[in-house]
Image (cartoon, helix red, strand yellow):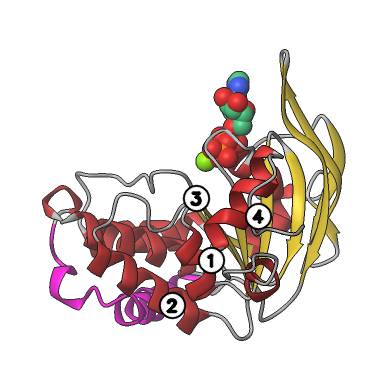
Amino acid sequence: MIEVNHLSKRFESIMAVDDISFAAGKGEILGFLGPNGAGKSTTMKMITGFILPSDGEALVCGKKVQEVPTVTKGLIGYMSENAPLYDDMYVEDFLRYAGELRQMAADKIEAGVNRVIDLCALTSVRYQKIETLSKGFRRRVSMAQALIHDPEVLILDEPTDGLDPNQKHEVRTLIRQLSGNKCIVLSTHILEEVEEVCTRAIIIAKGKLLYDGTPADLKSKSKQHKLDDVFRAITTGESVQGVNL
Ligand SMILES: Nc1ncnc2c1ncn2[C@@H]1O[C@H](COP(=O)(O)OP(=O)(O)O)[C@@H](O)[C@H]1O
Ligand SMILES: [Mg+2]
């Protein structure tokens, strides 16, 4: 459902994404794992058609993002960095608006709004202004807008960033519930998040793809099964005791 071939992005002198290739299919929850500035968000922005690559290409459901961006954007639900929202809108109106932006038929919007309100547990805040919501609810509203058109591909940029442990748990549970017939890509710098929700992990550091496999495989590279040791060895290139890459 997602195919990325030799994707690169250069900003002036910075090679933000450097020749990344991978593919992901239905039912996968793919975690982009990497330190800050690794190139995770930039890769996501190229898949969603938000920015153009300097080199390479991204395909969504077999269609090239650069050739038919409006088609591929329609197949994707996207929660960008920091989950931006319109503070002065009411939850329900905002979701209706998101449906309109997605060019959903008027009669489908109402059903869509009800579906995502239910799915993201927003019933109690449905008639509330977004600016009055707690961080956890805000994040769920952002998830809801990404899901309004029931997309096949879901791209979530740091979906649990800034949330407390309980809220993180709720969002992770929701992500797991959503998988099945979707292909989900999420970014994180939290190792336990990858273990808890992802079926597969891709490690990105300094724009390069350094690992592609299952979280369990990743863990098995350390004698003590310590994911953070393996992650450190891969991202820094240092030799770490007990880790055999
Ligand atoms: N619009 C931009 N202009 C210049 N540099 C950018 C821009 N966006 C990202 N970068 C740089 O590209 C690199 C990768 O950033 P990003 O993809 O946001 O990393 P991550 O999401 O993994 O933290 C960083 O060095 C960042 O400063
Ligand atoms: Mg980022």
Q: Residue at x 37, y 51 (%)?
A: 161
Closer to the N terminus: mark 4 or mark 2? 4
31 relative to 176 in the view: left or right: right
Q: Does the numbered disc 1 mark a residue whose Cβ is under 8 Å from ligand 1?
A: no
- Describe the element under mark 1 as helix, strand or loop: helix
**Residue 75 lies in quadrant:** bottom right
Q: Main secondary structure of the magenta part?
A: helix
**What residue is rendered at 73% in x and 48% in y?**
69
Mark nearer the N terminus (1 vs 2): 2
Instruction: Tell which circle, 3 or 2, labels the residue nearer the N-terminal end.
Output: 2
| Amino acid type indicated by mark 1 | Val
* Residue 118 showing in the rendered view: yes
Q: Amino acid at mark 3?
A: His
Q: Mark 3 or mark 4: which comes first in sequence?
A: 4
Looking at the rendering, the stretch of residues picked out in magenta corresponds to 104-128
Which quadrant is the C terminus positioned in?
Answer: bottom right
Q: Which mark is residue 161?
A: none
Badge 2: few (under 14), some or many (20 or more) residues near its Cα, within 10 Å?
Answer: few
Element at badge 3?
loop
Which three-letter amino acid code belongs to the residue tagged 4?
Lys
Q: What is the x, y in percent for residue 176?
A: 48, 80
* Quadrant of picture, ligand 1: top right
Rate crowding at label 4 as few (under 14), some (14 to 19) or many (20 or more) other CA atoms within 10 Å. some
Q: Give the residue pinned by disc 4.
A: 73
Using the image, tell me which numbered label, if any, was put on residue 194: 1
Q: Is mark 3 within 8 Å of ligand 1?
A: yes
Q: Secondary structure at mark 2?
A: helix
The residue singled out by tag 2 in the image is 107
Q: Earlier in the sequence, mark 1 or mark 3?
A: 3
Residue 30 belongs to the span the image colors magenta: no
Query: How many residues crowd mark 1 within 10 Å: few (<14), some (14–19), many (20+)?
Result: many
